[in-house]
Amino acid sequence: MKRSEINAVIKRFEKLLEEHRFELPPFCKWTPEEWQNKGHEYDEIRDNMLGWDVTDYGMGDFGHLGLALITIRNGNVHNPKYTKTYAEKIIMCDSGQVSPMHFHWHKMEDIINRGGNDIHFTLYNATEDERLADTPVKIFSDGRCYTVPAGETIVLKPGQSLSLYPYYYHEFVIPEGGPVLIGEVSMCNDDNTDNRFLNPLGRFPTIEEDEPPYRLLCNEYPKAAD
């Protein structure tokens, strides 16, 4: 992705958050220049990859295959220094965008429609060899448990949520009608080792630096200043 495209996505995301009156923690508003002066007191942000995350999954087509996220809080399954067992994200996804089919080996998560458009989910159980199973999928949504055929569309309207367990393949797409603000509450998040995409994809974008960054992404922070 071009840096100018990432900057534009972040600014659009900030506007959506403002429309929904969703306030971000202070570190999400720091400029790249401000980051240069931050010491070890902010290691939790660096080590647990808190903050901005814009991805096209390495495919170069963000308008179709892309997602913009902010990790607000997170623990770390690889570092006993951090004892949080949970994570929280806020996500922007626009009409026509797809979050591609994947599951997590370890993470359980709730996906919440915080407002705007609908979210169209497709779910499958994973087979032992990590393909799509043709077996009924148990759905857990806002206190209701029921079963649907594999691959059936589940629609989350504003205010509704869906619980996703390990080895649940899931994909979602946003229909016409504008962006949706999505919440995620989960176990500790580890995007480096806990994503199993059905078709191999990258997780973070390759960036073409055509202008200065507006905000640093969560994998771009400089080392501590002291």
Image: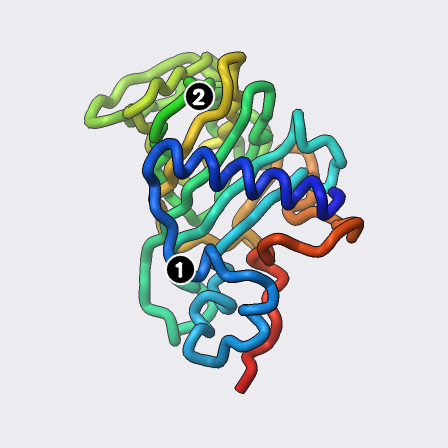
Q: Please indicate, yes or no, whether residue 2 appears anywhere in the rendered image.
A: yes
Q: Please indicate, yes or no, whether residue 164 appears anywhere in the rendered image.
A: no
Circle nearer the viewer, 2 or 1: 1
Expressed as whole percent of the image width and height from the top left, the position of residue 140 reads 29, 27
Q: Secondary structure at mark 1?
A: helix
Instruction: Reply above or below: 24 against 223.
Output: above
| Among the two numbered marks 2 and 1 on one chain, the one whose residue lies closer to the N terminus | 1
In this picture, residue 147 sits left or right of residue 106: left
Task: Give the residue displayed 45% in from the left and 33% down from the top.
Answer: 16
**Residue indicated by mark 2:** 119
Task: Give the residue displayed 34% in from the left and 23% down from the top.
Answer: 138
Task: Give the residue displayed 45% in from the left and 26% down from the top.
Answer: 180
Q: Categorize mark 2 by other alpha carbons within 10 Å: few (<14), some (14-19), many (20+).
A: many
Q: Residue lying at the far left in this picture: please name it.
A: 143
Q: Secondary structure at mark 2?
A: strand
Expressed as whole percent of the image width and height from the top left, the position of residue 105 reads 48, 46
**Residue indicated by mark 1:** 26
